[in-house]
Image (cartoon, helix red, strand yellow):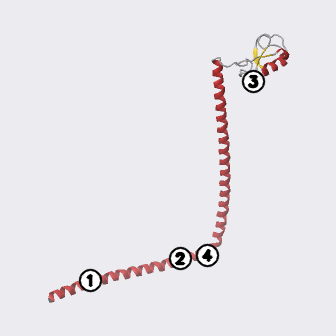
């Protein structure tokens, strides 16, 4: 079994040779890494020296940048306020538009009722009569108006707007209509 011992020794020699090669590669890498670190250290020292020379300039630049940042922050706040004001205005406008739509819808419904003959209206302003000041009133000639409209007309002209007969405010007759 000398052959076996020789084979084992050869295998051991090859393993040791590979280990030596690996160690040699690792040493080369370590040296290379150490050189790289030394180079970076030198570059950092040079960089620090350069920075020491321009430190004052950097401080001034930082102050300028801080001033610009503060200005931009103020502009952003101003922009946000303007945006909020616009949104408030838009919301108010939308609310007004919605309110006007509702009023228009009500008026349209009233007009449809008027067209169908279900609601009586003043022939001066075309608004329907109400139970407050604009109730139905007639003159002795039989023409019917809203109370506030015909009073104003009689005070200005002194006659019926339809037939032009002379009447006064005291000639008005209140009508009760449904």
Q: Is residue 79 left or right of residue 171?
A: left
What whole-number distance in Å separates the C-alpha atoms at marks 4 and 2?
12 Å
Q: Given contact means CB atoms under 8 Å apart, are the residues at marks 1 and 2 in contact?
A: no
Q: Name the front one of labels 1 and 3.
A: 3
Rendering coords of residue 166 (x, y %): 84, 11
Q: Which mark sits nearer the N-terminus, 4 or 2?
A: 2
Circle 1 Cα neighbour tier, 10 Å, few/some/many (<14 / 14–19 / ≥20): few
- Disc 1 on helix, strand or loop? helix
Q: Which mark sits nearer the N-terminus, 4 or 3?
A: 4
Q: Which mark is residue 87?
A: none
Which residue in the protein does label 4 denote? 52
Rendering coords of residue 8 (x, y %): 20, 85
Count the labels in the image.
4
Q: Which mark sits nearer the N-terminus, 1 or 2?
A: 1
Q: Quick one: 172 or 62, which is closer to the camera? A: 172
Q: Which mark is residue 44?
A: 2
- Disc 3 on helix, strand or loop? loop
Which residue in the protein does label 1 denote? 15
Q: Quick one: 106 or 73, which is closer to the camera? A: 106
Please identify the quadrant where the C terminus is shown.
top right
What whole-number distance in Å separates the C-alpha atoms at marks 4 and 1?
54 Å
Q: Which mark sits nearer the N-terminus, 1 or 3?
A: 1
Q: Quadrant of residue 105?
A: top right
Q: Quick one: 137 or 160, which is closer to the camera? A: 137
Rendering coords of residue 132 (x, y %): 77, 25
Q: Which mark sits nearer the N-terminus, 2 or 3?
A: 2
Q: Name the front one of labels 4 and 1.
A: 1
Residue at 66% x, 68% y: name it: 60
What whole-number distance in Å separates the C-alpha atoms at marks 2 and 3?
94 Å
């Amino acid at each position: 079994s000398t052959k076996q011992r020789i084979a084992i020794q050869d295998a051991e020699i090859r393993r040791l040779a590979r280990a030596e090669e690996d160690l040699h590669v690792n040493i080369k890498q370590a040296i290379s890494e150490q050189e790289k670190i030394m180079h970076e250290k030198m570059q950092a020292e040079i960089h620090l020296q350069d920075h020491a020379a321009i430190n004052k300039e950097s401080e001034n630049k930082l102050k300028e940048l801080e001033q610009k940042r503060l200005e931009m922050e103020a502009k952003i706040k101003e922009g946000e306020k303007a945006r909020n004001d616009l949104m408030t205005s838009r919301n108010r406008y939308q609310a007004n538009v919605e309110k006007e739509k509702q009023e228009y819808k009500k008026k349209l419904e009233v007009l449809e009722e008027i067209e169908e003959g279900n609601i009586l209206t003043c022939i001066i302003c075309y608004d329907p009569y109400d139970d407050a000041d604009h109730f139905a009133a007639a003159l002795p000639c039989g023409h019917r108006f809203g109370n506030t409209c015909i009073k104003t007309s009689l005070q200005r002209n002194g006659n019926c707007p339809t037939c032009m007969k002379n009447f006064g405010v005291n000639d008005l007759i209140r009508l009760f209509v449904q």
